[in-house]
Amino acid sequence: MTTQNATVEVAGNGRLWNRFSIGTKRVIWAWTFLALPIAFYVGIRFYPTFQAFWLSLTNWDLLRPAQFIGLANYERMFADPVFWKVFQNTFLYLLMGTPISLLISFVVAYYLDRVRFMHGFIRALYFLPFLTTAAAMGWVWRWFYQPIPVGVFNGILSMMGFAQQPFLRSTTQSLPAIMVPAIWAGLGFQIIIFMAGLRAIPSTFYEAARIDGLGDWAILRKITLPLLKPTTVFLVVFSSIGFLRIFDQVYNMTTNDPGGPLNATKPLVMMIYQTAFSSYQMGYAAAQTVVLFTILLIVSLIQLYVLRQR
Amino acid sequence: MATYTELAANKKAIRPGVIITWTLLFIGGVIMVTPLLYMFSTSLKSAGQVYDLRLIPAAPTFDNYVKVLSDGRFMRWFMNSMIVAVAVTLSNVFFDSLVGYTLAKFKFRGRYLVFIAILSTLMIPTEMLVIPWYLMSAQLGWIDSYWGIMFPGMMTAFGTFLMKQFFEGVPDDFLEAARVDGLNEFTIWWKIAMPMVTPAISALAIFSFLGNWTAFFWPLIVTTSRDLYTLPVGLSSFAVEQSIQWELIMTGAALATIPTLLVFLLLQRYIVRGVMLAGLKS
């Protein structure tokens, strides 16, 4: 009996399905395809986002249940000199890293685009560092910065008769020293994107400019750079977000004194990591992530604004 | 002489400037790969030779590799990274394409809302989500498991956006013809539409694999047992342990780097094209 009923029901469903119009059927297919992804985005993206905002208003420390404490975490953070040091470091990474890496990658892309001889090979040389693991390269560069007789840089300096440099041991040199491998690893990607942008500019523009008697420099300023603006804006934002979220290099290059010396290299993400997973002050760490979120949101909104101005 | 013929093909008179440009670019390129060359060179040096800063080892040896690989830890981390990166990449290719296709090719109410909602998650940094994810993993027992490492990346807004852009270029006629033939919607997507966007799929797969292979922040948080470390996290703990044995640290770094370099050498054309495609479309 049960089996019979089931059969009847299935047949019923089948008839129901056939009664739908083609349009309705496709809408049902669409939502079927989207069901699992929507559950994923709600459960793994949106809900945790709201939870992070909520936790930032609590004193949760993994041991006791979270208690609402209003804006106390934010008050504590804004009164903490370490936070302001970290805030400053984060923007130093951004303000030095983004312009330097974009300038280098544009110059390389601009000239590499005109080179035919061994083009693929040279491009590969610039691109290879992009494929490396930041954690591994952190250690390679850390080795370069060691004092004599281990470190390559100090070896070269002393060979040329210069004084040794402290690099990672100095409060002033360590942040730029960590930024170099971060810039180095990102160049290949930016060069490829710049070259793709350069190729997308129709050659008729250049021919017209030549006929008008414009020189290389004038063409670069009046045609190439303006037409390359969408590419440049994309790379500025992409690279800014990367530098604002720097962590892997800092973590691996300063394992003996994380973010040191004297917090000189500590970026915001590292402070978040330490607050959350070394001190287990989850509420306080969540407040720091909200600050990071706000900064990244502002950067993205600036991008939208700049692109809309076209 | 090849230089001259090649350059002449560029329809430009050979000026000294062209040769200087080429030479400078070449030197710059060599500087770019020097850290990698030094890493490999040092991994082939014995402990006594490390202080010799010459690039070519006087007496190259594979002893460091034997030493580092002998206790099986690196093999284990290598395997963990491989499992995680491959599984997440397959999931990205499947789900990001499916969602991108649905949003590009189905007309239904709420479509735009779903698209904007997914796209808006690009604004949320991973760092903000790790604390809730950690809480979730602790409650559900996902700490120290492959699933724990993988679950946050199973679908990505970037991949969905990329695939949607490409599926919009697939002509509706092909899909309609398949519908007339009586294929169901899933088969139409998988058998008809997917093969038409293979460049996009390879771009997505490359980005996804590379991103997960080199991922550090979340695996560092969600794994506490050494057996579950991914290669970057394992390498980091290994390097801390070795402290000043730089030849062993460089060997570990080389082991973490070799797979992606090999993949690049095999798939160079696809990778460069994939990066261009992804960059331009976004």
Image: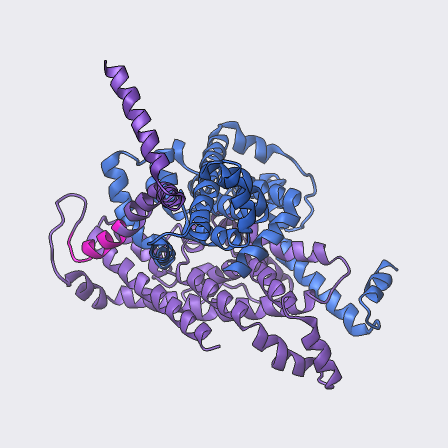
Chain colours: A purple, B blue
Q: Main secondary structure of the magenta part?
A: helix
Residue B112 in sight from this viewpoint: yes
Please tell me which residue is depicted at 67% across the width and 57% down the height of the picture.
Answer: A123
Residue A54 belongs to magenta span: yes
Please tell me which residue is depicted at 41% across the width and 70% down the height of the picture.
Answer: A304
Which residue is outermost to the bottom? Answer: A213
Q: Which of these two is toward me, A121 or B182?
A: B182
Please tell me which residue is depicted at 51% across the width and 65% down the height of the picture.
Answer: A235
Q: How many marks?
A: 0
x and y percentages locating residue A280 in the rendered image: 23, 48
x and y percentages locating residue A97 in the rendered image: 48, 66
Check the image and report above or below for B69 versus A84.
Answer: above
The reply, left or right, for residue B184 in relation to residue B277 is: left
Q: Which of these two is toward me, B139 or B259?
A: B139
Check the image and report above or below for A159 versus B139.
Answer: below
Residue A132 in sight from this viewpoint: no
Task: Specify the quadrant that holds the N terminus of chain A.
Answer: top left
Which residue is outermost to the right? Answer: B1
Check the image and report above or below for B68 versus B199.
Answer: above
Residue A246 belongs to magenta span: no
- Quadrant of the image occupied by residue B47: top right
x and y percentages locating residue B273 in the rendered image: 62, 53
Q: Which of these two is toward me, A135 or B61?
A: A135
- Quadrant of the image occupied by residue B155: top left
Q: Which of these two is toward me, B183 or B14?
A: B183
Please tell me which residue is depicted at 74% across the width and 81% down the height of the picture.
Answer: A210
x and y percentages locating residue A25 in the rendered image: 38, 42
Q: Which residues are magenta?
A: A47-59
